Image: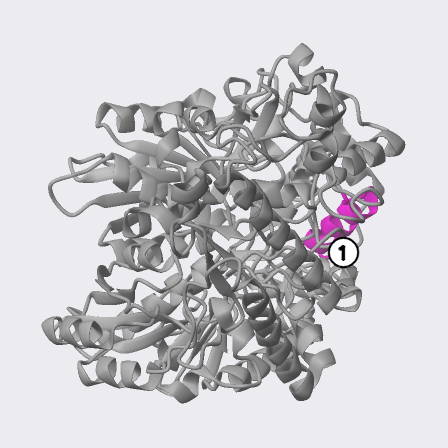
């Protein structure tokens, strides 16, 4: 998931889907939750028509319209509470309980599933991921088995390939937005995969015992601090805590304590006028504890204060909440505790992947372009990655300057007045933009405007985002050329003129063409009282050449992980900032901890004020290095490359849509549907055969079933384009062999693809073609080939086994 706050909001959405009530649904939130989590949950609840009540969990009243509740474990001020009585009352009323929790704490604390929680969420930042001024950090989302098919985001499940070998695959939810559209479980299709890998490798290296030692160290430090504060006659608020100590102070001493802390380069959290909290981690030393004690003593700490306190303390974790169950039981968590073995393990995993280091990845609508080393270097600088998300602004002036300059650049590129960097994924950018539109109408006394027109050529996540934003989706047809059917748009806008909120339009369209009627489209929507939201997924065809703001659009979101070079990382991190016209500026996202100053804000979208700041230097550097001329040149080359591929392939595979001049935008849709009739070949067969040629397949069956959508980007030289084109033409020849009877329909190079190394070198080979044709269909593959790890996946089997569970050791070893 994207971050802890959005994961908690997704938990509320799941609860709403599972527990239906007759009246207005009510969701209870414990006042001990993080303020940013409460704010994000409230924003999502407002959009879906859910009432949120915040108060002590112990006082939750589970009335008939209450669908569930959210608790924080440990709480935002550090307190560890026993929620078993609350959970029991919730279940008696048929309500669900979600626990927002801390992975490191759970190595010592009883896990939420054992005390009755139905859903557990949190983030994995504690597992070796830098703070990064707020992100990216991979969030997690876990549920009881009863609710697994309601889960949002990406799920890795177990399947098997054609040879019966174990295979892992992304299950149905992964891209269900493109299939189920407005019926999708969630709009989230970009997660923090790269960060999840980092956190998981941290867990692999340390293993359960190592993680527990780290947690015990942190917990001991907090225990020592609490004991010392009590000796100084301070009241420690909570008897039970893990790593955070809340302490009561006299208001008269508050400023003195904070000044003393700042003089030692320590930031303390102010809870209110007479409470502070101190959060510790594994980097805290005895010297740091001594500094903290000196701060609270308002004098130099006595040496015995810390030493004596450690000899007479009882553990602040109550016996009934101490963890007794095992965790991380898979063998991998016990065998990679040396740097050498860890290095080899990671390298073996990396060798299973096909990346841009091996070949072109022509995924349409995903813009897989080069992430230059110079752009990536700042991500590793401690000046960017070691800042706390809520540090005083006086300590983050460098970041603020970067934000301001990046926002100004993006505003100039898109032609809009202001930019918000808060949405931390493209899906969040869509959602935030629609909330801005809703808030705009509401502040004009037109809150009833809830109809969202979405063309069939729009990006696949748009309908799901609209539903999440509380809008009613009305589809708009496409014409024979793949453009928006302007007559149908006018008819739909007229029919819904009293309730029209907006149009979501993708430009160029997902069909791979520039909508020549885009200005007229905007005029029609405006004439009927709506706003025009432009999906920025295809901005790689616009930068430096044209601007959404100049067409008549009112706002757009940008995928920085596509157009502006932040790596995809196997699905994230991403950033989806929104750019808005002047009249929408007052409604941009705000934040409860670091206010952004928008008087009529649409709410809080992400946990951190600026989303995932530590990856923003990537886009900042890209724009600065390219300059105005370079950005425009990149766009021209991206469009040129797509048209080169389309023209070279058009005699072999029909290009489904082109513009009025016979050209495409930065991607093209190739029609494969007729091969089912002529040769019994499906588009999936062609995609799998492309793997044998050393390429990642293009996007399959989106936006049109039975097609391939190809996007080469500007990063690929002509030599690589020609290599891909040669492969596609060769595959057409293999299909022709089936059409004329040279190869059987049911047993051929395509239906058996991809061919693994195990299959090719195995003793048994009963195929009606040679091993050579199967594995090395093009010159050069003998010198370098990325072999697929598994063969054709059994999708139906995988759909029945959505959640990955640890296999037996013997099976894993095989």
Asked if residue 287 lies in the magenta stretch, the reply is yes
* Residue 717 seen by the camera: no
Residue at x-position 43% and y-position 69%: 590
Q: Nearer the viewer, residue 252 or 269?
A: 269
User: In the rendered image, which quarter contains the C terminus?
Assistant: top right
- Locate residue 15, reporting x and y percent: 30, 38
Q: Does 106 sit above or below residue 469?
A: above
Give the residue furthest to the right: 340
Crowding near the residue tagged with mark 1, few <14, some 14–19, many ≥20 C-alpha atoms within 10 Å = few
Disc tally is 1
Residue marked by disc 1: 299
Q: Is residue 21 left or right of residue 349?
A: left
- Locate residue 147, reporting x and y percent: 35, 30
- Locate residue 115, reporting x and y percent: 43, 22
Q: Does 28 sit above or below residue 94?
A: below
Asked if residue 558 lies in the magenta stretch, the reply is no
> What secondary structure characterizes most of the magenta part?
helix
Q: Nearer the viewer, residue 64 or 259?
A: 64
Q: Which picture quadrant has residue 658?
A: bottom left
Residue at x-position 19% and y-position 80%: 529
Q: Does 585 sit above or below residue 147?
A: below
Q: Nearer the viewer, residue 333 or 781?
A: 781
Residue at x-position 38% and y-position 77%: 515
**Disc 1, SS:** loop
Q: Is residue 656 left or right of residue 301?
A: left
Q: Nearer the viewer, residue 676 or 360?
A: 676
Q: Does 11 sit above or below residue 2?
A: above
Q: Which picture quadrant has residue 680?
A: top left
Q: Is residue 242 left or right of residue 773?
A: left
* Residue 536 seen by the camera: yes
Q: Which residues are magenta?
A: 283-298
- Locate residue 539, reporting x and y percent: 51, 73
């Amino acid at each position: 998931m994207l971050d802890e706050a959005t994961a908690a909001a997704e938990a509320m959405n799941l609860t709403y889907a599972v527990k239906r009530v007759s009246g207005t649904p009510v969701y209870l939130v414990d006042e001990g939750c993080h303020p940013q989590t409460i704010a994000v949950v409230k924003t999502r609840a407002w959009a879906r028509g859910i009432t949120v009540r915040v108060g002590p969990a112990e006082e939750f009243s589970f009335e008939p319209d209450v669908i569930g509740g959210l608790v924080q474990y440990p709480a935002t001020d550090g307190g560890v509470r026993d929620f078993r009585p609350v959970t029991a009352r919730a279940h008696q009323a048929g309500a669900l309980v979600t626990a927002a929790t801390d992975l490191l704490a759970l190595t010592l604390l009883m896990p939420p599933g054992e005390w009755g929680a139905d859903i557990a969420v949190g983030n994995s930042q504690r597992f070796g991921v830098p703070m990064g001024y707020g992100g990216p950090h991979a969030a997690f989302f876990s549920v009881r088995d009863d609710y697994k098919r309601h889960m949002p985001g990406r799920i890795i499940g177990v399947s098997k390939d054609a040879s019966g070998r174990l295979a892992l695959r992304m299950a149905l939810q992964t891209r269900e937005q493109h299939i189920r559209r407005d019926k999708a479980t969630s709009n989230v299709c970009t997660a923090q995969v790269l960060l999840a890998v980092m956190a998981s490798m941290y867990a692999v290296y340390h293993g359960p015992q190592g993680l527990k030692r780290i947690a015990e160290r942190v917990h001991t430090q907090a225990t020592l601090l609490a004991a010392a504060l009590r000796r100084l006659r301070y009241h420690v608020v909570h008897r039970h805590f893990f790593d955070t100590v809340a302490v009561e102070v006299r208001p008269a001493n508050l400023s003195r304590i904070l000044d003393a802390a700042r003089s030692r380069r320590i930031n303390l959290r102010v809870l209110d006028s007479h409470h502070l909290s101190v959060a510790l981690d594994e980097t805290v030393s005895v010297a740091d504890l001594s500094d903290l004690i000196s701060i609270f003593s308002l004098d130099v700490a006595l040496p015995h204060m810390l030493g004596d306190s450690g000899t007479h303390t009882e553990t602040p974790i109550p016996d009934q909440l101490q963890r007794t169950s095992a965790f991380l039981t898979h063998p991998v968590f016990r065998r990679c505790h040396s740097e050498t073995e860890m290095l080899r393990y990671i390298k073996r995993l990396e060798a299973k992947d096909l990346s841009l280091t091996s070949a072109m990845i022509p995924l349409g609508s995903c813009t897989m372009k080069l992430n230059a080393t110079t752009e990536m270097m700042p991500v590793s600088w401690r000046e960017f990655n070691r800042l706390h998300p809520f540090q005083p602004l006086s300590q983050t002036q460098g970041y603020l300057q970067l934000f301001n300059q990046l926002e100004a650049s993006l505003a100039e590129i898109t032609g809009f007045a202001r930019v918000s960097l808060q949405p931390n994924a493209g899906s969040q950018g869509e959602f935030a933009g629609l909330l801005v539109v809703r808030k705009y109408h509401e502040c004009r006394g037109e809150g009833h405007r809830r109809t969202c027109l979405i063309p069939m050529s729009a990006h696949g996540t748009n309908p799901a985002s609209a539903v999440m934003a509380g809008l009613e989706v009305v589809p708009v047809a496409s014409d024979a050329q793949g453009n928006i059917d302007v007559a149908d748009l006018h008819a739909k806008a007229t029919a819904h003129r009293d309730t029209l909120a907006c149009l979501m339009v993708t430009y160029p369209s997902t069909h791979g063409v520039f909508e020549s009627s885009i200005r007229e489209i905007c005029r029609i929507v405006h004439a009927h009282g709506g706003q025009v939201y432009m999906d920025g997924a295809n901005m790689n065809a616009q930068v430096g050449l044209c601007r959404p703001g100049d067409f008549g659009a009112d706002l757009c979101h940008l995928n920085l992980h596509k157009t502006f070079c932040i790596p995809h990382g196997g699905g994230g991190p991403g950033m989806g900032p929104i750019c808005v016209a002047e009249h929408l500026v007052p409604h941009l996202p705000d934040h409860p901890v670091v206010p952004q100053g928008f008087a009529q804000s649409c709410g809080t979208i992400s946990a951190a004020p600026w989303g995932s700041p530590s990856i923003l230097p990537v886009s900042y550097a890209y724009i600065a290095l390219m300059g105005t001329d370079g950005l425009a040149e990149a766009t021209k080359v991206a469009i040129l490359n797509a048209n080169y591929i389309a023209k070279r392939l058009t005699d072999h595979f029909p290009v489904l849509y082109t513009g009025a001049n016979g050209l495409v935008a930065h991607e093209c849709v190739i029609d494969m549907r007729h091969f089912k009739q002529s040769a019994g070949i499906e588009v999936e067969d062609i995609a799998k055969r492309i793997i044998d040629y050393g390429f990642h397949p293009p996007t399959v069956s989106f936006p049109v079933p039975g097609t391939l959508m190809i996007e080469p980007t500007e990063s690929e030289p002509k030599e690589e384009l020609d290599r891909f084109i040669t492969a596609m033409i060769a595959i057409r020849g293999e299909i022709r062999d089936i059409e004329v009877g040279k190869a059987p329909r049911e047993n051929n190079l395509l239906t058996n693809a991809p061919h693994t190394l195990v299959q090719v070198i195995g003793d048994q080979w009963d195929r009606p073609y040679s091993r050579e044709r199967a594995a090395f269909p093009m010159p050069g593959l003998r010198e370098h080939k990325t072999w697929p790890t598994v063969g054709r996946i059994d999708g139906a089997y995988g759909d029945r086994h959505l959640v990955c569970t640890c296999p037996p050791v013997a099976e894993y070893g095989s």
